[in-house]
Image (tube, rainbow, N blue to C red):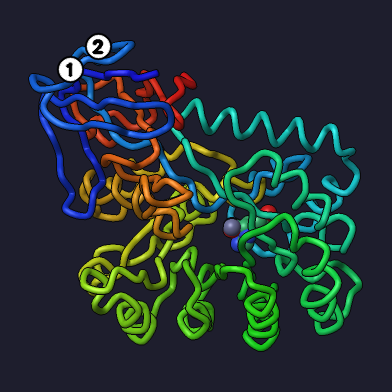
Amino acid sequence: MSVLITNIGELLTSDPDGTTLRDAAVVFEGERISWIGPAAHAPAADESHDAGGRAGLPGWVDSHTHLVFAGDRTAEFEARMAGESYAAGGIAVTVDATRAAGDYDLTRLLLARVAEAAAGGTTYLETKTGYGLDVEQEARSARIAAGVADEVTFLGAHLVPRGEDADHYTDLVCGPMLDAVRPYVRWADVFCETGAFTAEQSRRVLSASAAAGLGLRVHGNQLGPGDGVALAVEFGAASVDHVNHLTDDDVEALAGTWAGFAARGEPGTVATCLPACDLSTRQPFPPARRLLGAGVQLAIASNCNPGTSFTSSMAFCVATAVLQMGLTVQEAVRAATFGGALALRRHTGDDEDGRRAVGSLAVGHRADLQLLDAPSATHLAYRPGMPLVHAVWRAGSRVR
Ligand SMILES: N=CN[C@@H](CCC(=O)O)C(=O)O
Ligand SMILES: [Zn+2]
């Protein structure tokens, strides 16, 4: 079954050259893109959809969320808006609520959140454990997430549970907990920050996770300068997320991982920006222009979670990145699509590959496309907060 989407006024492909096509069309054949080019030359297809001159772009790739949780943290948010600062300890409130929820409720809540993200144009989504924090609960979160999300990350090292010794808990994360979640996850992450895990504890988590064959990610440099970026680079992590407080050495270290990327194609450590979280925690935004200037690849993700960023709106994150971080619309869209795919190492893969690339539009890539109720992607920032999603296809199927 083939589908032609034609009369796309402006099409941002998020390909490596940043190609934008005018008066474009795309053809899907099953789950893959089989043709892309000028509408005037488009081949016929079984079905056709007239985009009416609207803008098109890849579906969002949300590479950082924490959606397996119960309860909310409205009171903490109100206190923060009244001047309190964010501290990792709030995570424990969500751990209590999550542990108390049954499998059915936890799954239902997760499904509803993923559906909300999809309605906002997200077509590929990562989510993490991290609100269970014991062997059984982390394994349960991982199992539930694996049935719903595209990618699952083990974040047993999110917070040391109340009353536990930090080093003893780190041993648990690196041993029995890692073994229990291993069948369900592709990634491991650690919150390397004051109040969460020290550099030494983070190093142990990353070593054990790498030895177990997991890809690595790091929450780092969120609340102050720290060792997260340096550790992520040392361990060849796919991404370091937050990156609000960076030294010159951090920027240089990240840039070093991208030297020669264009020629060798092997990606370095992506700097993942979480602008909705930065607004809610009143942290300085990451130095995005400086990172880009140094050659670092950026991702933008929602970090949807009940503590620091209770939104899965990638459009809101993109608008914030443009309005507050100084990115162009094209740079922000690229970071929220191709950048997220890079951070999840899903940026390549075509007909020859078992797995199709997401996050950019090209023949052989997965047919993930959104149309905006707007003539250009600039409207994402020009009309922030407006419901601009007109239609969404995920793996060739219309989901909105
Ligand atoms: N920073 C650590 N973890 C989450 C917040 C989790 C929470 O507060 O519940 C984040 O990415 O912001
Ligand atoms: Zn996070």
Left or right placement of residue 227 versus residue 148 in this view: left
Q: Is residue 187 above or below residue 350?
A: below
- Asked whether mark 2 and ligand 2 are closer than 8 Å, the reply comes as no
Find disc 2 in the rendering and name its residue: 50
Nearer to us in this view, 322 or 229: 229
Label 2 to label 1, Cα distance in Å? 6 Å
- Residue 199 x, y percent position in the rendering: 62, 85
Q: Residue type at mark 2?
A: Asp
Task: Tell me the quadrant of the picture where the N terminus can be found.
Answer: top left
Residue furthest to the front: 352
Left or right placement of residue 368 versus residue 148 in this view: left
Residue at the (59%, 50%) spot, across then down: 151
- Would you say residue 227 is visible in this rendering? yes
Q: Is residue 376 above or below residue 151?
A: above
Q: Is residue 186 above or below residue 398?
A: below
- Residue 123 x, y percent position in the rendering: 47, 36
Residue at the (69%, 84%) spot, across then down: 204
Q: Residues within 10 Å of mark 2 (few under 14, many from 20)?
A: few
Left or right placement of residue 50 versus residue 249 in this view: left
Left or right placement of residue 198 versus residue 394 in this view: right
- Asked whether mark 1 and ligand 2 are closer than 8 Å, the reply comes as no
Q: Residue type at mark 1?
A: Asn
Find disc 1 in the rendering and name its residue: 7
Residue at the (69%, 46%) spot, across then down: 146
Nearer to us in this view, 230 or 50: 50
